[in-house]
Image (tube, grey):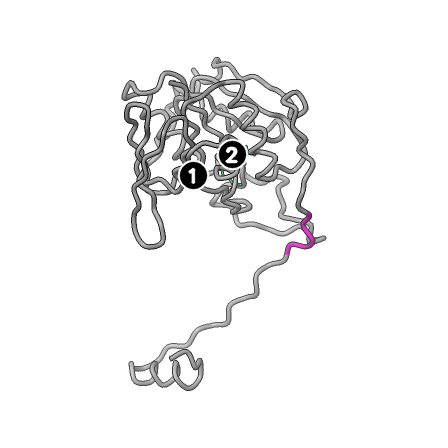
Amino acid sequence: MKILVPVKRVIDYNVKILLKADGTGVETANVKMSMNPFDEIAVEEAVRLKEAGKATEIVAVSVGPSGCQETLRTALAMGADRAILVQTDTETQPLAVAKILKALVDKEGPTLVILGKQAIDDDCNQTGQMLAALLGWGQGTFASDVALGDGSVTVIREIDGGLETVELKLPAIVTADLRLNEPRYASLPNIMKAKKKPLETVTPAALGVDVAPRLTTLKVVEPAKRKAGVKVPDVATLVDKLKNEARVI
Ligand code: AMP
């Protein structure tokens, strides 16, 4: 059983985001980039399924500029078998990525695609859902547990009201939530081994996908600064302020 794991290169979650002076986006020059944290969880889950003898091959995919090779090498060092870079310098939006992934699914024939639930740069939370719709496959989004059965996969989903269990016919789409697992750090020997694993580069055009952005960013601005809070001496004052100043109770 083959598993496809899409991994996005994003600004590292520890970096303080700075806006470009002209308001067209965020500064990415000389900024540390890393694999989207939810994608690390997706790779880890795929590797665990392989270690448990339930999967035979893990293919990591990234859509973006040549720098994504580094992200793919990280996936390979964590345990993916081979990688595909769909190289483009055009800004990648979820629909374009979903179309590219569909083309790769048609070519590679995986039984399971495990994505992150969302990319922490744009916070779109759309690609997995769009891919499921394009393929007509079942989807288990926000997964906190994945159990492969015979011809099906059982996914426990984190939803607003608690947990929901769904059983999907394979092939299927799963998107990883935070509590699914704790991703491993790649060991030095595995980082060295990953350098020799196959990494193929293709273009969106070769897959027959037009990646031209469908969405236009008008302006990117900082959120309004929060006002300083106040300390209240007791509960009575707090209740009074909530009632008469904030008027929320
Ligand atoms: P999003 O819908 O943008 O929040 O992304 C959800 C998930 O789709 C990510 O966690 C990745 O698994 C996958 N994804 C999105 N963009 C890309 C990309 N450019 N390359 C590879 N995977 C991506």
Is residue 225 positioned above or below 102 on the image? below
Which residue is drawn at the image coordinates 29% and 81% (left, top)? Answer: 235
- Per the image, label 2 sits on a secondary structure element best described as helix
Q: Position of residue 4 (x, y in %)?
A: 45, 25
Examine the rendering and report whether any part of residue 181 can be seen: no
Observer-nearest of 51 and 164:
164
Relative to 115, 182 lies left or right: left
**Of the residues shown, which amino acid type is indicated by label 1?**
Phe
In the image, is residue 71 part of the stretch drawn in magenta? no
Residue 176 picture location, percent across and down: 39, 38
- 219 inside magenta stretch: yes
Query: Residue 107: which disc?
Result: none
Q: Nearer the viewer, residue 247 or 182?
A: 247
Image: 111 above or below 238: above
Q: Position of residue 105 (x, y in %)?
A: 51, 23
Picture quadrant where residue 142 is located: top left
Q: Main secondary structure of the magenta part?
A: loop
Q: CA distance from mark 1 to mark 2?
A: 17 Å
The magenta stretch spans which residues?
216-220
Kind of element beneath mark 1 = helix
Front in this rendered view, residue 205 or 243: 205
Determine which quarter of the picture holds residue 47.
top left
Who's the residue at 37% across and 77% down the image? Answer: 231
The residue under label 1 is 38
**Which numbered disc covers residue 131?**
2
Q: Residues within 10 Å of mark 1 (few under 14, many from 20)?
A: many
Q: Amino acid at mark 2?
A: Leu
Left/right of residue 16 with respect to residue 231 in the rendered view:
right
Q: Is mark 2 within 8 Å of ligand 1?
A: yes
User: The N terminus is located in which quarter?
Assistant: top left
Location of residue 136 in the rendering, given as x and y in whole percent from the top left corner: 48, 32
